[in-house]
Structures are given as structure tokens and as C-alpha cells.
Amino acid sequence: MSSRRLPLTQALRLQGPSAIWFKPALSVVVSTAPPNLLLLALGRLDLALYTMAGSLCALYGHQRPYAARARVLTGVVLGMTAGLAVALLASALAPGPVVLVLVGALLAAAQKTVCESTRVGPPGNVVVTFISSAALFIPQTPGQVPAHLGLTLAAGAWSWLVCMAPGVLRPHGPERRAVAAALNAAADLADQGHAPAHPALHTAWQALRSPGVRPDTTRRALENLLLSAETADADPGRLRVWAQALRGTGPVPQAETTHPAVPYPRHARIPFKHLAPIASRTALGCALAGLAALSLGVGRPYWALVTAASLYQANVTLTWNRSVQRVVGNLLGVLLFAALTPLTHLHPVTLVLCCLACSFGAEALIARNYWLGSVCVTPMALLITEFTHLQDPGTLITQRVLDTLVGALAGLAAAVLVTNRRAGDRVHDALTAVENAGAHTEHLLTHPAPHALPAARRALALALTDLRATTAAAQGEWWQRPFPAERLALAEQAGHRTLAAAVRHRAVAPLKQDRHGTTEDTRP
């Protein structure tokens, strides 16, 4: 095994806030508050876990256009309900806690695999695994399951409406934000004399061409802005003016070009063979964590299981970083819980309000760093356990600290033990994709076909972006096959040269007017 540095301070370094941090933060509060307050009024806060399963679906999809967001949220609500159904049935039928831990480990692995394969985005599998793991240890009878799942579906439907509601006032908001970010990135790099910011441009194109998103006048205008940003002679000042104009609901600036109707390449689903090592790590780590917690006599082994499930990132190095973040955040979080306990024990209303405040704080801070968000996630999870009845805070804190340490150690051990030699295979596949896309683009530079070069150029940009991400993941993995460093360097250099040539080719291609006097883009 090669020597790897496992830094501490880098894992805890804060980043800038997300541009839309307030959207998931407000959405989760608006989604959670009505069901919880209604249950409080009915004296049935013990049912809050089932409604919160649906309410927490509001954390997903905020970067996506509304048509695509509707599809993703529907899938998340159904996936959450399916995981909860398995957990509740296991709780009702399983013979003992060991079986429940094993079911939870397999569920966590399946949820991790599905979220990674479909690229559902943050918060990924952690929220779904938290709900299903907690439900495993709630006493249940088979006859109660349908009603509890009905509560989840009802709260999930409310979350769906909350997340879709802003589209009434700003139907193109996500696309406008993505294009504005791409224009600013292209302007920054153009000022430095480099090629356009291909990852940001690709993200914007993905937003405009998301499944279910229909072309309209506004999206066509946004696409024309992206086409202008892709040219080698793009004016940085003009790009920034356009980006500023996209804020709010004002008209979209009109670029001087029209776009060819070419398809845009998308990220393919990750094959299971590449996800198998991460799924195995998740299953093993969660099982070890849960069983270790049981052996220590912890009353809530699902906390250790969820801790392990939350650690697994693209490679061992990133998993170590997440382990540090999780432990630091949880330890600080139990201190915050201890400080809130005198307030939450005053009245059930203050308990619910403190839980809502923690959910807002978690989403507001987690983009800065995972550990900072965990400072609020931990007391929120502890407060949820008190919805059924108030408990001794000292016992809760002791068990949570113990479960955090057990889960982190077991999860990290599984990440080291289960090798991911598939990471090297993904690099070879990504290298081949870049080489093939580069060769195709070079051919079109000398043998142009109508509208073929833009699609080839974007496919090459996507291949280069995927290669960089795949390489970064493989370089942080241990027990790796020999790395094709020389081939990688040559492929990236050649790919970027070809990409720059394709951009220049588009920039110098002429425009002509048709017989109606309309400007037509004749560039390939």
C-alpha cells in the first residue's frame, strides 16, 4: 500500500456559502413545520418520524430546472417510502436486533448504490438511510405499516409542492442561475487568456437540456448566451453584464447568435461494476458499526450504522476527510444539544421549534463544510428521539458520542479493507473516451459536417471533465493498480488543444443572412 497523507486541518477548512443555501434551508422548515405542529396539536408527536420521512425529501433537487426537479422529487419520495416500508416490515417481523442491523446494512448499501448511479445529488443517501435505519428499531406491527406509510406519502406530497412552488414566480430560475455562473466562469478565464470554463458551461447546458424540459423562447435565449461564452473571442465584460442581468425575473439579454439544434451529451449512469466496491464498503461498514454498538449495549445502534453510511465518498482519502468532519461535528453537536435541553424540556412547542431551527441551521451551514452542518444535524436527530417522550440528556449524549466513535472507526476500517481496484479501470475507460472524442473532433475540423462540430466539441468537453473527476477519485484510492500517468497527461493535453481549436473554429466561422434578412448561424 502506498503512503498517503491523511490531513486534519484540510478536512475542517471552511468554504464559501452556497449561492442558494437559503432555498433548501427554508424548504425543509416549511415542509416540516405544518406536519409537526399538527401532530403536536393532536398529541401524536410520536408519529413525527413518519411525516419527517416525507418532509426531508424537500432537501433534494434545488439545483435542477422545475420539470426535472418534479421527476427527481417524485423518485425521492417513492424511494424514501420504499426504504421505510422495508424497515417497518423488518421491525415487525425480524426475530432480533442482530437481524435488524444486517437489514439496515443491506438497505444502506442499496440506497448508496442507487443514489450514486442516478446522480441524485446532495444530500445523497444519508437522509434516506437515517430514516430507514431509525425505523428499524421502532416497535411495529404489520397492521400499522400502511397507515405510517400513508403519513410519509402525505408529507412527501407536501414537500413536493413546497419545492415546486417557486417555479410559479420564477419558472426559469435554476436555468438562469446556471447560465449566469457559466458566463462568470467563462469571463474569469477569458481574462486570464485561457479557454472557456468547460465544467461550468457543461453544467449550464445540462440544466437547459434536462429530461422533461421543453424548449421555449427564454431557454433559447439562454442557450445563445452560452454559445457566445463558448467562443474564443468572447468579451469578458459583456459576459459579466449578461450574468448580472440574469438575476431576478427581468428579460434575458439577446445575444447576436442563434444556436444550432444539436443534442447535448449527458453523464451516463455509473455501471454497477464500478459501484460494487463502494456498495460492499457500505454494507460491511454499517454491519460492523451496528453490531459493535449492540455488543457495547448501546440502545440505538442505528446511530452507529448511519455514521458509517455517511462516511463513504469517492475514495479512501475523501472518506477519511468525511470521518474527521463527522466526528468533530457530532461532538460539537452534542454540546449544542446539552445547551438546548433546558429550553426543549420546557414545553413540547419549544421542542418542535428547536428542532425546526436546527434543521434550518444544518442546511444553511452544511455547504460551508460537512462538520459545520453536522453541528446542527446532531441535536436535531437527538431532539427527534424526544418526540415520543423526554429522556435523560446525559444518557442520550453518552450513547451518541459512543455511537459516533464506533461508527467512524468501523466505517473507516471497512473502507481500507475493501479495496476499490475498479477505480483504475474507470480511469482507463475515461481515457479511452477522451481519446475517441478528441479523434472525432479533429476529424470534423478537417472534414466539417453541418452542426456536427458543436456536438463533438461538447462531447469532448464532457469527456475531459469526467476524466479529471475520475482521475481525482482514483488518485485518492489505496491498493491501486499502476496508474497511467504519462498516457493521462498526453490525453489531457491533446484533448484541450483540440477543444481550443474547435472553439476557435467556431469563433471565426461567418454569419450570413437568409432571404428574409434573418441572421443565420452557419458555423458548424
Image (spheres, rainbow, N blue to C red):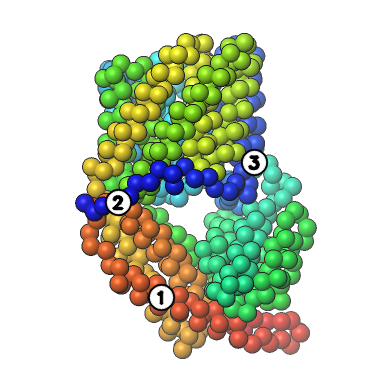
Q: Residue 292 in the image: state x and y as whole percent.
A: 27, 25
| Residue 369 left/right relative to 27 | left
| Residue 47 left/right relative to 492 | right
**Residue 476 vs residue 287, the one in the foreground:** 476
Given this view, does label 3 or label 2 mark the residue nearer the observer?
2
CB atoms at circles 3 and 2 under 8 Å apart? no
Q: Residue 155 in the image: state x and y as whole percent.
A: 58, 29
Does label 1 or label 2 sit earlier along the sequence? 2
Label 1 sits on residue: 493
User: Pointer 2: residues within 10 angstroms few (<14), some, or many (20+)?
Assistant: few
| Kind of residue at disc 2 | Arg
Label 2 sits on residue: 4
Given this view, does label 1 or label 2 mark the residue nearer the observer?
2
Q: Residue at x 46, y 89 (%)?
A: 446
Label 3 sits on residue: 22
Query: Real-space Cα distance between discs 1 and 3?
Result: 40 Å
| Residue 295 left/right relative to 503 | left
Query: Quick check: can you spot residue 104?
Result: no
**Residue 298 vs residue 11, the one in the foreground:** 11
Query: Real-space Cα distance between discs 1 and 2?
Result: 27 Å
Q: Secondary structure at mark 1?
A: helix
| Kind of residue at disc 1 | Gln
Query: Real-space Cα distance between discs 3 and 2?
Result: 37 Å
Decide: is 468 above or below 133. below
Q: Residue at x 40, y 55 (%)?
A: 269
